[in-house]
Image (cartoon, coloured by chain):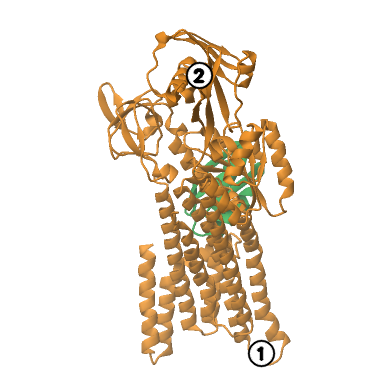
Amino acid sequence: MTSKFKIKGLDCANCASQLEREIKKIDGVENASISFMTERMELEYDGDNKEKILKEAKKRIKREEPDVTIEEV
Amino acid sequence: MKKKGIKILIALILFILAMAIKFENVWINNSIFIISYIIVGFEILKKAVRNIFRGKVFDENFLMSIATIGAFAIGEYPEAVCVMLFYQVGELFQSYAVDKSRKSISSLMDIRPDYANAYRNGNIEKINPAHVKVGEIIVIKPGEKVPLDGHIIEGNTSLDTKALTGESLPREAKVGEEVLSGCINLSGTIKVEVSKEFGESTVSKILDLVENASSKKAKSENFITKFAEYYTPVVVTIALALAIIPPFVMQNQEFADWLYRALSFLVVSCPCALVISIPLSFFGGIGGASKMGILIKGGNYLEALSKTEIAVFDKTGTLTEGTFEVKKVEAIGNAENTKVSKEELLKIAAYAEYYSNHPISKSVKKAYSKEIDEKQIASSQELSGLGIEAEIEGENVLVGNEKLMKEKNIQYEKTNEIGTVLYIAIDGKYVGYILIADTIKKDAKYTIDTLKKSNIKQTVMLTGDRKEVGEAVAKEIGIDKVYTELLPDGKVEKVEELLKEKSSTGKLAFVGDGINDAPVLAISDIGIAMGGLGSDSAIEAADVVIMTDEPSKIIDAIKLSKRTMRIVKENIIFAIAVKVAVLVLAAFGISTMWQAVFADVGVSILAILNALRILHVKKR
């Protein structure tokens, strides 16, 4: 399953790629792609565990970049 | 951003003050430096502290803090303030540039309609397009954007399709015709019956496609992220080694001197210049392409386009218009039969074909273009695979191919014209033929010529059409190779063969009209669909969608991809070269921390400016 998110508050391109790496490590996430330019994240993941995965993703985002917020589109 | 600017200004004034006055008391001078430093760098320090607790030692805030605090520690007060100042100015400029380019790209794609005038209960209500349902009637006034796809039920107008196709000539639209969301209504007020919901409409699909393009990253983009992942730890490790090893291993070495060199390393260790300028370049390339009516679904495809070696074209609808047209009417006189005029020949054929919906019949009727009096057609019968036999004004009329003439034992003269030939006989006598053929697109030859000049090794045409027709078209536009009489899976086979012929880095691009060629689009390195405007299947199946019907847009797409890749390479080489040079100079104690800051922020800014060049697309 694929979901798209608007990702706000990223202040550098390197941070975006670091965040992308962290999110890729989550169990059940097949692929993650964060674009610093369009401020979007595309997440391919196991749809059965959507809630659990999104919760973990938000947790990691909070830890890596406290100022960043995401919102599903 | 404004607040940051003011902070930088105050800090700068204090800094200049301290430098210029040079207070007798060193402590006063140094305090001014420290105050200036805190004003400009507090935010960085705060983030650095926060990041240490999260175990992020390779964070740029942390590295800048260490470098500047280190400079204070070895007594380089002005240097510390200056590095922080310069760094913040650079950051400010960088976020300005990113912001600016985001805006200029989104303005390129400024086709999202804000409202729709829905016609409800006799009143016009201004509502959100997303709330309009299929079948509702909307009113579009001159100057407004078409908010949803639909058909005109009242009025006629001309539409500006520039935002969708890059085409500057307006398109005329009248009752019954389709209008697509994203166009701008220019001249008349029209009433439109909505045929698609907002989410399904052309404008939403295009916006979605462009916005998602950035998630398919190019190889060079991934290379840079990978590079950045190793670059920072390596540079920081060397910095640490520089600070510790030489002073202890070698004799008569000043610890402060080596520490200074190590601190310079830390300043250069941030990979941001590279990491930002590469996606920005691709983003600009994709944005610039959409301005020309070319939608590229990802940086990876933009990169592949620049390496196109073999260009394969479908014939019908791609290089040719895909519509049949009467090219020639030839009336043949003979002794027993007074010569039938060309007009009469066309008239007879049009009458005979009147009840048929075959594309060929349509083209004959279109060429005749006059009113047809049904009463004169006594009977008309379609003979499958042969043609038509009809009774018109008491005469027996035969219109069809050679087989029909042979079947009916008509003495006819065979012609060698290329195309579909309709032989016509009246009361058993051959009277002439009509030649029907597909028209080659105006820019087809130009496209192939230009492609050949620009390092494309092979141009190939695939068609399901007859050998003579296919070869004649290929010859006229000068394509290298042609394969004719192919069934859909035959096209797949040929493309598979061609894929083996290209070099290991080269790419094969297939250009089709998106109808019936989805499998070929899928197996090609780059699947390009033409005439995407209004065709959902083309937009979905292809990697690159050309909104208009012009094959020459492929040249624009390839040119733009090459330009983008050149800028990407320039940025990678430039940024790495400057950083390595400054690192080497710093290691030998030749460069200062100032130069190191330049290598960091200065390079980012230059790389960003370079990337922004892509946005300035020149019109052909």
Chain identity of mark 2: B
Chain identity of mark 1: B
Where B324 falls versus B547 (above or below)?
Answer: above
Tell me if I can see residue B101 in this picture.
yes
Look at label 1 and name its amino acid: Gln
Look at the image and tell me in which quarter the C terminus of chain B lies. Answer: bottom left
Count the labels in the image.
2
* Alpha carbon separation for disc pair 2 and 1: 95 Å
Callout 2: few (<14), some (14-19), or many (20+) C-alpha neighbours within 10 Å?
Answer: few
Look at label 2 and name its amino acid: Asn
Tell me if I can see residue A51 in this picture.
no
Determine the colour of chain A.
Answer: green
x, y (%) of residue B476? Answer: 58, 43
User: Helix or strand or loop: what does disc 2 sit on?
Assistant: loop
Where B161 falls versus B19 (above or below)?
Answer: above
- Mark sitting earlier along the chain (2/1): 1
User: Helix or strand or loop: what does disc 1 sit on?
Assistant: loop
- Chain assigned orange: B
In the rendered image, which residue does mark 2 sit on? Answer: B357
In the rendered image, which residue does mark 1 sit on? Answer: B253
